[in-house]
Amino acid sequence: MSLASLSIQRPIFVTCTVLLILVAGYLSLSKLGVDLFPNVTIPVVTVTVPYPGAAPNEIETLIAKPVEDELSTISGVKRVRAVCNEGVGTVIVEFTLETDVKYAEQQVRDKVSSVKPKLPNDAKEPVIRRIDPADQPIVIVALRAELPDAELYDIANEEVKQILLSTKDVGNVTIYGGRKREIHVELDRNKLKEHMIPASVVSNRLASGGMNIPAGKVSKTDKELVYRTINEFQSPEEIRDTPISLFGNEVPIKIGQLGEVKDTVEDETSRAYLNGRKAVFLMVYKQSGSNTVAVAQSVKKKVLEINQDLLKRNGSPELTSTNDSSITIDNNIYDVKETIIIGIILTIIVVLLFLGSVRSTLITGLALPNSLLGAFILMAIAGFTVNVMTLLALSLAVGLLIDDAIVVRENIFRHREMGKTAREASIEGTKEVTLAVIATTMTVIAVFMPIAFISGIVGQFLREFGLTVCFALLISLYDALTIAPMLSAYFGGKVGNHAHNSSSESIPEITTKAVKGKTKGATTLEEIAYSKIRSQNKTSKGILSAVFSPIVFVLGKLEVGLDSILSIFNVFQSWLEEKYASVLKFTLKRPFFILSGAVLIFVVSLVLTKFIPKTFLPAQDEGKFTVTLDMPPGTSLEKMSQIALQVDQKIRSYKEIKIVSMFNTNRSTNMFVEMVPSKDRKMNTTQFKAFLRNELAEFSYANPIVKDVDNVGGGQRPFTLTVSGQKREVVEDYAKKLFERLQKSPALLDVDTSYRAGAPEFRVVPDREKEVLLGVPGTIIGTELRTLVEGTTPAVYRENGVEYDIRVRLKDSQRDLKENFYSSFVPNFNNRLIPIQNVAKAEESTGLATINRLNRNKAVEIYADVNPKGPGMGGAMEEVAKISQTEIPLPSGVKIGYSGQAESFKEMGVSMAIAMGLGILFIYMVLASLYESFITPIAIMLVLPLALCGAFIALFITQKSLDIFSMIGLIMLIGVATKNSILLVDFTNQLLSQGKEMKEAIIEAGRERLRPILMTSFALIAGMLPIAIGLNEASRQRTSMGVAIIGGLISSTVLTLVVVPAAFSYIEKLNQMVRRNSPNPDA
C-alpha cells in the first residue's frame, strides 16, 4: 500500500499529525533564542600582562617573547600574535577550529603558570580570556550627572552596575570612563632628601601597616574563638599620622611630615562622552547562549526603573541606553519575516493562476505553514536560534516547500481531467510522480547538506542555514505525499472545462440540496458533509448548514469572481503548450545547434564573472558606524579630548545623526555613531559615510577613519593583511611601501597601518661599575624611580565596604623626571640616598608606539575598508598579489597573510567550491540510484551550467557582488535547477517504457510537464522577488542572493525546456546502446 493510499484511508490520523506539527512548531518557535547571526565558535585565547610604565620594546623582550615561546608548544595552535603597547602586552593564540576551546583555554593557563617565574617581578597578574565573537556589549548604558567624578563613579560602580548584574541573563557589566576615588600620598622630594628616606620605604611601610590579617581560631569544648589582627587604615588622617621606622635610634618620622595625604581621584587615563557631554559608560554583556533581544529589553526596562530613583537625587543623575544591538537584530529579523510573508503571498498567487482553482491552491498552499513550523521543531532539537541565516533559509525555502505539493496536486488534477474519481486520481496521480518528487527533494537536500559540514568559519556561519533548509524540505516531502493526496481526495473540487470552473449557488440553494440530496458536481468531501446534514435532526441540520454552507459559498464566490482572469490565463497556457510543442520539434531536428548555443552562452557568462565585484559580506544600512581618530604618540588626553569634541560637534551638526558615543584615550578616540531611522533621512549609511569622509578632511592631522561597525570580523577591519618576517627593518620598510601604494587603490578606503612613530622617551641608563661601588643595583634604581613617577599602590583604604587604592608618589610638580633628574636620589643597600647622577646617566630618545608580532616574527598590519563602488574584496586581494609579484616584489624572508573578513573571503571561495563539488556528486549519486543508470543523470544535470550562467549574467547586469549570500544562491540553484529536468526526463522515461517512439515521447512529455515546470519555476521566482528587491534597508544586504537565484531560474527554466530534450535524444541512444551491450545476469 502506497503512502498516498494510506493517507486517504486514514484522513483523521493525517489531520492529527498536521495539528501536532503545527502546535509543536509554534511552541518550539516561542522557546528559540533570537540573535543576529548563528553562534560561531572561534578557538581564540588571549593572555594580557600589564606591566605599567614599560615601553613597547621592553614589553616585547620581557613579556611577549617568553609567553609566545611557551604557548607555541601547545598542540593545535594555528597562529600566535602579540601586540606590545606601552605598559601592557597581549598575546593572542588562535587554534584550529577542531580544537575544543575550553581545553585550549586550560592549556594556555597551564603554560602561563609555568612561564610566570620568567616574567618581571613587578609585572601584574596575567589575565587569560577566551574570546567569543558574540562577546560584545548588547547595550551601553551612559550615566551623566552634575556631580564630582568620584561620586559619579561610585553610583555607576556600586549601585547601577550591581542592579544590572542582577538582571536575568546579564553576564557581565564593565565600566569605561569616570575616575574612582583614590587616596594619594604625595611626597616632597626635598623632605625625603632632608630626612634621607627613600620613597620605596614609605610604600613598604604602608604595605605592612594597612592590612587585616587573620590569626586563626581556637576550638574548645563549648565554643570556638576566631582571632584577627585589625590593621587597616580607618581614615586618611590615620595614613598621614603613620610613623616610619628607621634603622638605628633615630626619631620616627610620620608620613605627613614627608608630604601631603589627599583624598582625591585616580589619574585620568580615558574619558567617555555622550553627545558631547561627559559620562560614565556601563557596557552590558549577556550570558552565553541567551536571547539577545530579551536581555536587551530587560536591561532597558531596568534602566527606566533606576532612573526613577536617580532623578530624585542631587545633581540629577540620569541613565541613557545607547548602542542597543537588539534594534539591529529586530530590524533584520522583521525584514526577513516580511520577506517570507510576501514571498508566500506571491507564491500562492502564482499557484492560483496556474491551477485556476481556489480549493486546489489552498490544498497546495497548506504545505507552507506545516513545513515552516515543522522546521522549528527540528531547529529547537538541534539547538539553533532564530537569526538572519535560519530565517533566510526558510525564506529561500518558501518556493521549494510548495514545489512538491505543486507537482503532486497538478498531476492529480491531470488525472481528474481524464475522468477519474477524486480517490482514483489522488492515488494514481501521486503514485505516478512519487519517484520524481523524492528525487527532486533529495537532490536539493544533497546540495544543502554539505554546506552544514564544510570546515572553517564560513562552515560554522552557514551550518544552521543548510540544515534549516533540509529540515523544512523533509517536512514538505511528507506533506506532498500524504496531506496533498488526502485533501485532493476529500476536498479536490470538481473538474469542468477549465481548472477554475466552479459553482455559484447561494446558501439557501446549497442548504436545500444538502437536505434533499447530493448537489450536482459536489466533491467527495461535500457529499460526506451533505450526508451528515441529512442524517441529523432539524436543530443539528441548522447548525451544520450554518457552519458548512458559508465556507462553500465563499469559495464558490471567490472562484466565480476570479473566473475571467483565470480563464484568460488558462487559454494562455494552452496556447503556450502548443507553441512549445513546435519549439521541441525544431529542437529535435537541430539538437547540435541548440547545444552549441548553450555552450556559447555559458562561456560568455564565465567571461562576465571577471567584471562582477567580489567580497565577503556586502555593506548594510544599519544606521550605525564608527569614527576613529589617531594622534601622534605623546599626545595628552586633554589635547586628544579637545580635538575629539570638535569632530564630535561636526558630526552631530548633521540632521542624519541621532547619538554619538565617544571613548577617548591619550592619543586615540573611538566614536560610535547612531543615525536617525532610515525613513527620516535621505542618505543610507554607505552614502553618509562617503559624505562624512570628505567633511572630516579638515581634521586630517587626527587621521579620521570612518568605518562600519564590525559584527563578524572579531573587531578587525574588513581588509586586514599582515607583513611579517625576522628582520624588523626589512618588514617595516616593505610595509611602508605597500601601505603607500594601497592608499591609491580604488578597491580600498581609509587605508591605515599599525606602524606608528614612537613616543618620546626619557631613559635612565645605570653605570654598572658605579652600581657595584655605591651599592645601588639597577633594580633598586628602577623601583625607586617607578615609585617617584608612576607611583605604587601598596595598600587600600576601605569605607562603607568599598575599597580605594592608596597611591604613593611624588607630588605633581616634582614628578617630571626630566626636569628634576639632577635633584633625584635613589637608595643603596643601607637605604642611604645617593644622587642618581652618580650611578646613572639620562638620555632622550623615541621608541615604537606599538610592536606587532606574528608567529614569533616581526609584523606590521595594514588594514582598510572595502570600497563599495570598487572591485570588492576579491579585486583588492588580486591587486595585492600583483603588487607583491611585480611592482614591489616581496623581499626574501618576508610574507603576506590575511586575517578577519579577508581571510574568511579566501576561505569562502575554497569552502563553497568544495560544497558545490560535493553537491553535484551527491546529486549524481542520488539520481543514479533512483533511475538505476549512470547515464540518465547526465541528461538531467546538464542544466547546472545553464543555471549558473543566468546567475552570473544577472549579477553582472545589476552589478551585485559575488559574496557569501550570492554564493548561497548559486548552491541553491544547483539543487533547484535539476528539479525541472527531473520532471521532464522522468515523464519521458515513463512514456518510453510504454512503448512510445523517442521524439513522440519527448514532445508529449514536454507538453504535459510544461505547466508544473513553469509553475514551480515561477513559484520560486515569486518567493525570491522580495529578497531580490530589498524591501527595507536592512534587507538590501542580501539582494545579491535573490538576483542570482532569479537569474539562474530564468535561464535554467528556458534552456531546460530546449537543451535537456536535445541532449536527452543523444544520451538516451547511448543509454540504449549500453543496455544492449551490458551482461545479462539471468543468461
Image: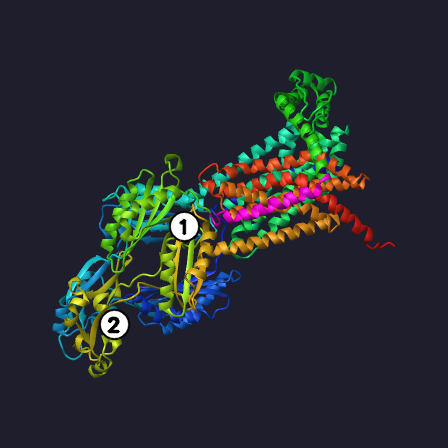
From the top left corner, tell me how far across and down residue 264 is, in percent.
20, 57
The part of the chain drawn in magenta is 589-617
Q: Residue most toward the bottom? A: 773
Quarter holding residue 775: bottom left
From the top left corner, tell me how far across and down residue 562 is, in percent.
61, 23
Q: Magenta stretch: dominant SS?
A: helix
Front residue of 887/978: it is: 887
328 drawn magenta: no
Q: Residue most toward the right? A: 1083
Front residue of 549/746: it is: 746
Crowd tier of the residue under label 2, counting other residues whose Cα lies within 10 Å: few below 14, some 14–19, many 20 or above: some
At label 1, the amino acid type is Pro
Residue named by callout 2: 783
Q: What separation in Å lies between label 2 and label 1 (alpha carbons)?
A: 52 Å
Q: Label 2: state its secondary structure.
A: helix
- The quadrant of the image that shows the C terminus is bottom right
- The quadrant of the image that shows the N terminus is top right
Crowd tier of the residue under label 1, counting other residues whose Cα lies within 10 Å: few below 14, some 14–19, many 20 or above: some
Q: Is residue 919 left or right of 644 when viewed as pictured?
A: right
Residue named by callout 1: 746
Q: Is residue 334 left or right of 51 when viewed as pictured?
A: right
